[in-house]
């Protein structure tokens, strides 16, 4: 955060000199001190945010992969003359603690083709699947594992 304050000051200045760099450093230190003292900011919180940010980037990558894989499965189902989809409602429980993680899981399931989150009540999810094959392993999916890791 200290470096961010300094970089913002540096970008907003039109000239670069030793005096401006010193003033920018002093202002950045004062802003950082103010944030720590009065805004309940800490280095530990910043490190936690950074770790969660990288986990979130990995989560988005896995989500994109799962969306592509589910698209292929649904296309095979639609284009195959032999495969008759059998829709099913699946109910399962996932021990996620935060509302944020529960919402992320529900949205990830809905974004994946062939599945729609119908309801979320506490830890219990009800999901409509286009076919029974799409419903296997939802309660211990890679999404759940990654969200548990982000919550820890």
Image (spheres, rainbow, N blue to C red):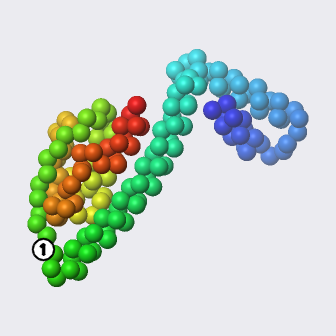
Residue 144, percent from left and from top: 32, 44
Q: Quadrant of residue 96?
A: top left
Q: Which quadrant holds the C terminus?
A: top left
> Which residue corresponds to mark 1?
84
14 to 150, vertically: above or below: below
| Image mark count | 1
Residue 103, visible in the rendered structure: no
Specify whether 7 is left or right of 38: right
Q: Nearer the viewer, residue 102 or 35?
A: 102
Q: At 30% from the left edge and 58% from the top edge, which residue is drawn?
A: 111
Specify whether 33 is left or right of 91: right
Q: Within 10 angstroms of label 1, few (less than 14), some, or many (20 or more) residues?
A: few
Residue 143, percent from left and from top: 34, 48
Residue 35, percent from left and from top: 59, 24
Residue 136, percent from left and from top: 21, 55
Q: At 55% from the left edge and 31% from the top edge, which residue is drawn?
A: 47
Q: Residue furthest top?
A: 37
Q: At 16% from the left edge and 64% from the top edge, which residue is drawn?
A: 131
């Amino acid at each position: 955060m200290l470096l961010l304050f300094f970089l913002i000051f540096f970008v907003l200045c039109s000239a670069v000199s030793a005096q401006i760099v010193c003033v920018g450093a002093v202002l950045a230190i004062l802003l950082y001190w103010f944030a720590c003292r009065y805004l309940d900011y800490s280095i530990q919180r910043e490190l936690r945010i950074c770790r969660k940010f990288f986990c979130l980037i990995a989560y988005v990558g896995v989500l994109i992969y799962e969306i592509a894989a589910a698209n292929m499965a649904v296309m095979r189902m639609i284009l195959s003359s032999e495969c008759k989809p059998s829709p099913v409602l699946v109910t399962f429980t996932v021990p996620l603690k935060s509302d944020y993680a529960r919402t992320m899981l529900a949205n990830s399931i809905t974004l994946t083709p062939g599945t729609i989150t119908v309801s979320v009540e506490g830890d219990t999810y009800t999901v409509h699947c286009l076919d029974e094959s799409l419903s296997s392993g939802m309660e211990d999916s890679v999404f759940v594992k990654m969200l548990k890791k982000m919550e820890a």
